[in-house]
Image (spheres, rainbow, N blue to C red):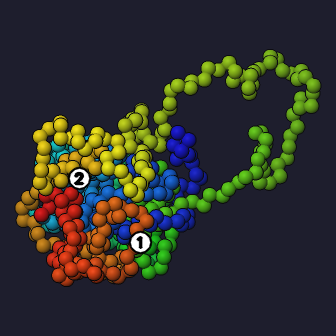
Amino acid sequence: MASFLFFSESFGQNYPEEADGTLDCISMALTCTFNRWGTLLAVGCNDGRIVIWDFLTRGIAKIISAHIHPVCSLCWSRDGHKLVSASTDNIVSLWDVLTGDCDQRFRFPSPILKVQYHPRDPNKVLVCPMKSAPVLLTLADSKHVVLPVDDDSDLNVVAAFDRRGEYIYTGNAKGKILVLKTDNQDLVASFRVTTGTSNTTAIKSIEFARKGSCFLINTADRIIRVYDGREILTCGRDGEPEPMQKLQDLVNRTPWKKCCFSGDGEYIVAGSARQHALYIWEKSIGNLVKILHGTRGELLLDVAWHPVRPIIASISSGVVSIWAQNQVENWSAFAPDFKELDENVEYEERESEFDIEDEDKSEPEQTGADAAEDEEVDVTSVDPIVAFCSSDEELEDFKALLYLPIAPEVEDPEENPFGPPPESNTEDGPAHSGSGDKKQRQPSAEGAPPKKKARTTTIELQGVPSDEVHPLLGVKGDSKSKKKAAGRPKGSKGKERDSPFKSKPFKGERVFPLEGGAAKGKVQAEPGQLTAGSLVPPAYKQHEVQGLD
């Protein structure tokens, strides 16, 4: 509980001011997102892994071997038990964070730009495919709904849930914003973002604040516009709302890669698309309060603001950088009633200050410890932490997953140390033989039940081109982070691939299978090794990507 209270303390200025170290995920990091409380940070990597960091200890809590191709988008569920991920091979997967198992998969015809869990309903996921209208997935029955768009010829659409998931905001390349009711997809309000004249500008992203009704729109004209959601709904269809603030870099005309609000919604951070630089504005006034500069020559990939504390995580060149405030330590100790003065203050002596007995005192009052003795102290009830509750909630979610238990790694685990002896398995049921039995028993080597196969659903979208390439794979310029081969390095199998102590490949190294399957000192490839013409080891094909082939 002490750590929770530490989160909710005020730190004076509520924005970071300097670099506070990095998180090295071994693999190249591409995207990151905090859970609702900021206790865990999920990082998607270019080898398909999801690395979950415990943000209090700054250590790796879990590694999920999620995809074969790079992870391009991540989002936590409200209670923190689920994680939805998208990779550049058009696959959307849902993960159980505690077990690391895949619950469901969805295969799309085009690359996925963004995935987002419904802020309140764990049964709904919003997906934004390239060159397609946004899709609302219902997880219980694996059904999907294609959201209506303003212009069928313009399918460069971005979308986002509002703060409570009641509405979905969509924006297209012609600057048109549509507000749809989440339940029935009815159009509630709409407006067009213009550049002062009749010219329109493309919508790049829509982001909502965690508190309040504000949201921002990042557009191609390099201006970040902040709107009030209540005003948008009041204006209705074809309204003309005025933005609360227009934020931009007038000197350098910087285009913005990623924008987001601070946890309290009072600040806005925008990451430059040209360099590793973060610009922080105060929302109420619109003034630029800080520019954080990273390593020169690096390109920014993603930015995330901690939900509770003034901390920012940014990704460039495959490394997660942490930005925080400079905490000045003060080890001096004074009496409880001692007051430090910055300058001299004229002291006014009370008339009765040095009297043995205060003659003017009418009745002795109980103060301090004497008064506290008569108060009844409640030691059983736990007050909810305001920072962890929404404005419409009175209590915290006690089923929420705030931390991940970390199990010690055993180098040579015994065969099923806590389960029944192997002979007793044959008595319970008929004997199984063949490769099917081997597949079923393999995951249960540690006494756990066999993993169930994740259900894969293919999403059919009409008129969507299937030969599109994800922007992460086609970006030019960031040679440092793009030269490394996408996918897992050769020969990583078993526990080795999840070990945080594995050595990093050299920059620029591309890993290809050996021709003819010949290795040094070996003529024929053993089972589990990469062979010619196969970029995926058989072990991954069996367990990690069921239903993909």
Graded by Cα atoms within 10 Å as few (under 14), some (14 to 19) or many (20 or more), the crowding at tag 2 reads few
Tell me the residue that label 1 is attached to.
Answer: 503
The image quadrant where one finds the C terminus is bottom left
435 over 5 or under it: above or below: below
Q: Residue at x 69, y 21 (%)?
A: 373
* Amino acid on which disc 1 is placed: Ser
The answer to whether 329 appears left or right of 156 in the picture is right
The secondary element bearing badge 2 is classed as helix
Which of label 1 and label 2 is nearer to you? 2
The secondary element bearing badge 1 is classed as loop
How far across and how far down the image is residue 300, in percent? 39, 72
How far across and how far down the image is residue 510, in percent? 29, 80
How far apart in space, not on screen, are marks 1 and 2 (Cα)?
Answer: 27 Å
Q: Quadrant of residue 148?
A: bottom left
29 over 3 or under it: above or below: below
How far across and how far down the image is residue 443, in percent? 25, 51
470 over 157 or under it: above or below: below
Graded by Cα atoms within 10 Å as few (under 14), some (14 to 19) or many (20 or more), the crowding at tag 1 reads few
The answer to whether 235 appears left or right of 383 in the picture is left
Q: Which residue is drawn at 57% across and 48% down?
A: 10
Residues 245 and 417: in front is: 417
* Amino acid on which disc 2 is placed: Gln
Q: Disc 1 vs disc 2: Cβ atoms closer than 8 Å?
A: no
Tell me the residue that label 2 is attached to.
Answer: 442
How far across and how far down the image is residue 389, in percent? 42, 39
The answer to whether 40 appears left or right of 234 in the picture is right
